[in-house]
Each structure stands twice: as structure tokens, then as C-alpha cells.
Amino acid sequence: MNKKKTAIIYARVSTSRQADEGISIDSQIEQAEKKAAELGATVLRVFRDDGISGRTANRPAFQNAIQFCEGYDIDYFIVWNTSRFARNKLDAASHKKLLEGGGTKVVYVAVNIDNETDEGWFSESIFEIMDEHYSRQVSRDTRRSMLKNARDGFWNGGTVPFGYQVVSDGQRRRLQVLEHEAILVREMFDMFFAGSGCKLIAMSMNERGLLYRGRTWTKGHITNLLKNPAYAGYVAFNRRDKKTGRDKPESEWIMTKSHEPIVSEAESERVRHELKMRSPSGEGGSPHSTFVFTGILRCGECGAAMQTESANGRNKIYHYYNCSRSQKGGGCRPRRISAGQFDSWMMDTIIQRILSPERMREVIAEVRELTNNWQEDRDRRIAGVMRHIKEANKRRQNLFDILELHGKDAPNLGDLTVRLREINANIKALQDELAVIESEEMPEVDISENQVRIATETMVNILRGTTDNKKLRLLMGQFIDRIVLNSADVEMEYRPERIVGTNEKCREPVVHSTEFWLPEQGSNLRPAD
């Protein structure tokens, strides 16, 4: 007995304006229910995220939908289009990998993509890259508007810093110093300069009943307050890493003067510098799974996996790829290669060899050729079915001729009747097969040169810009089977059906000077000076 197909529906809009101007969540759900009916699947649950960006995976309903699919063996994850699933290529890849592992297929309502075929996989990837490019463009436009608003002295919203209040100025708002809180802010700065730590400052405020807007102060509250450039009259953009929630290096902040300060710019900078000097160093830590090509690299001499290991130098910890068999004393010679240098070089090589605009154009040409081949293959299949129908009709006509000639006296009349029913059933099955083939829609590849350029640039920016190596490994694993480190070159084995639309694996040598990625090593297992 065949298991009845099941599905869930996920719908999302980023803003109320998008819900008004684009396709609403209710419309997405309605169309998705029709798609489920076409697939012969029962919808078990509908998940919806209102007013949440697709740039982040931290969407409650989306996460619940993923977990529901894992727990209930769902066949289809139905969503309006690629941008509703995710506007981040790496998040899309990791979550689809998770769904595929549980046997759940992602199905789009607005675009006809069969991601089990090579051309479907490529089209889906292009859509995802274009979605992320659009999202990043919107983000840049929004940041420009917010910067201009801040330069004009207006408040962009968010948590109002302690020591300030928001006042209306026409249709917009400004930050204004709230003097009775500002007095405490200045005292906190003075206490810090006198040598008190953030915890001691918090305890002092709480003991005196000087609370944080009704709440007790914590060490974290004080630290964040002292680090905040708002008290010097600045608004800082690009301050926090959206993935980790931690502050980025101050050199990457975008600062603009916006409102009345409570402390001087020099005092604010001094506090941030001293806080940084007092903080423990974050360097070092385990090298486990922190490099891009972990799990993909193989030793060219024995075929074993290249694993990461670390060694202590004079002032830092060094990380290397080394043959796992050598690490276990299995007989292969040590192959210590600087993991950071190799990742950087290999990433550049992949971008130049595989993700270059020239190669992407080859991919499109190959996919278009596959589309043309599809038409030829469809015509051949139709001709084959028509030939079988013609032959079956001929056999049936022969039986009719015998019955017409002999009537009820025809020899083996019962056998002839059974045979006639079998031929009729065969003809009906062939006619149904013909109808299915004729109803197939030709895969469309409508990608311009400009889209190729944008997609390529966006993909390269994704690869160079992400700090999540786990997601990078997932992305690489979509088309790279393994990378073999030989004595004097690197051999990469990848799936060109995912790159150039062929059906055979390709082994591409990537020759480079051994001095670059096999440096001479000093006594502390680090590249010699």
C-alpha cells in the first residue's frame, strides 16, 4: 500500500507594505494549497512569519516548519518562491540539505523548478543568488537612508540609550539629553577612569538605589553603556555582527555625528580603548571544524583524510592540515600545511577556475544546450510511443479481421477475446503515456549576461564575506567531491553536472608553487620567517 503524501506550507512577508504591494501571506497559502492538491499531498500544517526578513534564519515559524518536517517525515515543504524560503544563499543551502536528509523536498509555487535535475538545480541557485543580491541592495539603500537621517540629527529608532529621551520634531524624532540620567552616566565614566571595574560600578549604583529605569544594573549593562559611542553624540552603523551578535572591530564601524553628547569624544574613545585592553584575549581555541575544507581534503600519497591539528608557537597557536594516517602513526609521512594559508589560496583558485564569469557563461550555454536536447529527447519518446501504438493497433486489427472472417466459429474464440482485451488495455496505457509526455513543459532558461555577472559577483562576495565555515563547507560540498594534495600540485575532483552540465566527473589539476602552500617549517611547526 502506497504511503499517502504529506506536505507543510510556509509563508512569509518582510513588512506590512510588502504584504500590501506584493503577494499577501493569505494569497501565498491559498496558492500553496492548490500546489499541494496538484502533488496529491495532504497539508498537515501551515506556518507563517509576518514582518520577518529572509536574510536571517532566526524566523520562529520557519524553524518550527523545519523541525516539523524532521519529526513527521513530511514529503513536501511548499513555499511561494526561493526568496520566501531564504534570501541568504548559505542559509538556503544548509536548510535544504537538512530537509533532503529527512526525505523532504522543497517545492516552489511561483516558479517551476525541478531541483532534482541539473538545469533545475542551476536555475534554483541563480534565483537564490539574485534574491540575496536584491536583499543586500535593499539593506544598502536602507543604511544610506538611516545614515542621512542620523546626520540630519534625527533618531532612527531602537532602544533609547540611558541618559536620553526621544522628543518629536515634526513627523520625525530626535534624541535629547535627560539630565537626571545623564548625571549618572558622567559619574559612571568618572568611576571607570578612577579604576573601578564594570561590576563594581553596577554594585555601587544598585546599593544607592540608582536603578536602570526600574531595574538593577548588571556588569553587562555598564559595559555596553561605556562602549556605546552614542554618549559622545555619535550613531554607529555596522557595529555588530548579525550572525554572532558580537561587536565588530571598531575600524569597521560607520560613525556619524547625530545628537548632543553627554561625554566628550576623547573620553568615549579612551573608555573603549581601556575596556579592550582589560578584556582577555580571544585568540586561540580549538581548531576543530573551523576551516573550510575539513572533510574534503585527501592525502595524495595514501588517500587518507587530511585533518586539522594545532601547535603552540612563541606568541600564538598555529593550525595545520595533516594526513590523518600520519597523525595516528600509520606509516604515511607528515604533511603539515598551514590551514589558513591553504583555505585562502584554495578559495581564490575555486573562484578563478569555477566561479569566474567565463565559466558561468559556459554553464548557461550548457544548460541551454540541455534544454534543446530535452526537446529532441521528448520528440524521440513521442515517436517511440506512437510506434508502439501503431504496432498494437495493427495486432488488434488482425484479431478483428479473424473475427470478421470466422465469426463465432473462429478458432480459440475465448483466447482471442482475452487477447483483444489485453491489446486494448495496452493501447490505453500507451495513449496515457503519450498524453503525459505531450503535457510536459520545456524547462526555461531565461538568464541574461547581466544576471550572470551579478550572480557571479554576489556568489564571490558570499564566499569571501561569510565567517561561518560550516556553511561554506556545505556550499562547497554541493559540487566538490574531494581535493587531493599531491607532492607538488592539488587535484580537485568535482561534479561538472552541477557546474557545466555534463554527466561525467572531472579531475582538474591545480598546479601551484610548493613554496606557497608547502612552506618550510620552523621548530615550532609554523612557516619559517
Image (tube, rainbow, N blue to C red):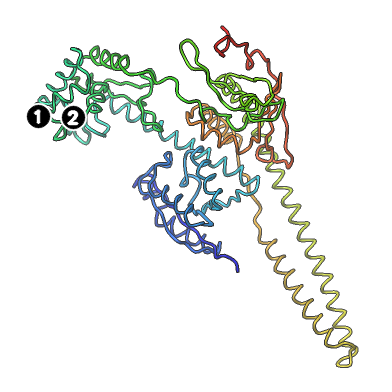
Q: Quick one: SS at disc 2?
A: loop
Against 294, residue 88 (above or below) is below
Quarter of the image where the N terminus is located: bottom right
Residue 194: image quadrant is top left
Q: Position of residue 182 (x, y in %)?
A: 14, 23
Q: Residues within 10 Å of mark 1 (few under 14, many from 20)?
A: few
Against 483, residue 122 (above or below) is below
Between residue 181 and residue 216, name the one nearer to us.
Answer: 216
Q: CA distance from mark 2 to mark 1?
A: 10 Å
The residue labelled by disc 2 is 217
Q: Earlier in the sequence, mark 2 or mark 1?
A: 1
Disc number for residue 209 = 1
**Residue at (51% x, 57% y) in the render:** 74
Asked whether disc 2 touches disc 1, contact meaning CB atoms under 8 Å apart, the reply is: no
In the rendered structure, the answer to whether residue 515 lies left or right of residue 26 reads right
Question: What amino acid is labelled 2 in the image?
Answer: Trp
**Residue at (17% x, 28% y) in the render:** 164
Q: Quick one: SS at disc 1?
A: loop
